[in-house]
Amino acid sequence: MNLDFLATRARDLPPRHRSARAVFNYTWELLNAREQIRFSKLSVFRGDFTLQAAISVAQIRPATLNILVEKSILRSDKPGRYQVHELLRQYGEERLQQNPAEYALVQTAHGRTYGKLMQEQAARLRGPEQKVAIEAIRADLDNVQAAWQWAITHQDTAVLQQSAAALFKFFVWHGRYQEGIDLFRAALDPLQNVTTLETQETRANLNLYLAALLARLSRHDEAQRLLAEALALAKAHNLAAEMALVYLYQGQAAYTLAQYDEAKSAYQESLNLYQALADTGGEAEAIYGLGNTHYQTNHFEQAQTYFEAALAMERALNDQYGIARALNGLAAVAHSWSGDYVQANALYQESLALRRDLDDVLGTAVTLNMLANLASVEGELLLARQYYEESLAIRREIGAPLGLAVVTGNLGTIYYELGEYDTAVTLYTESLTISRRIGDDLGVAYCLANLAEAAHAKGDFAQAEKQWRDALQMGLQLENDDRILFALYGLAALWLDPETAVYNQQQGLRLLHYVAHHPACSQEVKAQAALLLPDILTLSVAEPETRELTAVADEIVIGKP
């Protein structure tokens, strides 16, 4: 829409009312010279803005703002905030552009005002004022993005540096990954061939944030390339804080790909650097990451220690986002290891309340998924379905494929438990397709096991055995004890079923006994084993299996028994 678009051919209107431009020309003439100058400077704002920003950018007095409101040049629909109608803003900008030097100065003031504002919000995002900071960024986002574009055009690396951390967190919390990717990529492209120290530091920061956003959309190859480049830049210029953050994100990327040894190593490097920097918030993030990797490798006691340490640090900082994350980790340990479902539920609910209050969209989806897992184990299938469906709706809106695959598969397990096997298979297959497309081998292992269970339930025993063996092989490939044990449980259940062609009671009992007594066996698998054979945990078997887990699994994969 432009100023000349809204015109009329009505013959009975005075000339000053026959176009928007004519109306604005008339209104302009009603302002005195000081008011004209101040109004034209306000045209650099996008959307609404605060009194403080107006003073900083346009050197305007509160009294002048009130006069412009009274003359209907500005609106003030929210306390302490002002807005110019877009057509009127365009008119004011045209007036300001008549003095190019002044226009450049005002734009510079606007860009640097919002760069400083974002730097302040980044600090607030690491403490008790997170919610206030997120709301402030949301309210000023149009202006922040305009300032970002100005900084790109003028290669003002200071504004880019000031804005990057808070913008990244804002986009992550709200699941607006592609929007963040576009913004960071647009800033990086013009800096590729600039070699000043300030530019190299900025590139390192932009690279690592862009990489972290790409990883959330499972674009791992590009993410890893950018992280490697960011690390090289950080090392070349001895940027310890940037190195710590790169290692943190490398740990997250490796964790997502189920590369747990690499994840532990990267998290430890990050932790060492954050400790040297005395950065408690960074330490807590790295420690939480170590907790996650130990949890996924069934080292539950160590995981609990890490999560407790992270929680203590986050509470000391009053970092609500970090507290919610650590609570979620502790809940997962209570759920999977100690089997204290009451405690797990209480911790998940506390985490969920914090995440909802912060409008942490991704975190909310994660905790809903975990609550659904817990409800499923407790047999509350309809509650589990409700949690999964709410989590899935968020995941579909966000569009992050990994989370979408996880929750889709989990929802399939509810339909499996409800006896709706065809619906379960449809959901499992969708999850498997996504997992294979994004290279999520752990997801593939889960889906194969789920499909094997469904095939068994539907009486397709040959397909069930094939998929259990495929799932077992994937577990071995990943060196994931949890997936290996679950696949062995599935095969034992198949061999203990007298309706199958592979019925072998002695072998099935021996394998089930081995799984249920293995130290890495989760509470859920133990419970399922007990459903097959109620006294499995106390039963003695002839010649119990004593070999290492991988030896047992390898023998089955190659076709024995």
Image (cartoon, rainbow, N blue to C red):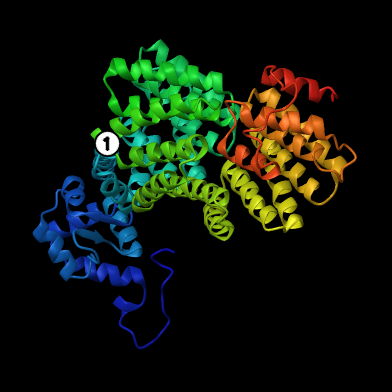
Q: Nearer the viewer, residue 493 or 306?
A: 493
Q: Residues within 10 Å of mark 1 (few under 14, many from 20)?
A: some
Q: Nearer the viewer, residue 401 or 161?
A: 401
Q: Residue at x 52, y 47 (%)?
A: 374
- x 35%, y 71%: residue: 20
Label 1, secondary structure: give it.
Answer: helix
Relative to the observer, which residue lies in front, 456 or 364? 456
State the image coordinates of residue 555 (x, y, percent, origin top left): 79, 20
- In the image, is residue 442 above or below residue 248? below
Residue 423 vertical placement versus 314 (above, below): below
Residue 52 in picture, x, y percent from top left: 17, 49
The residue type indicated by label 1 comes to Arg
Is 313 left or right of 214, judged from the image as shown?
A: left
Residue 482 horizontal/vertical position (percent): 62, 30
For residue 299, side relative to residue 428 (left or right): left
Res 531 quadrant in image: top right
Asked if residue 121 shows in the view, the reply is yes
Residue at (80, 46) in percent of width and height? 456
Q: Quadrant of the N terminus?
A: bottom left
Where is mark 1, residue-wise?
315
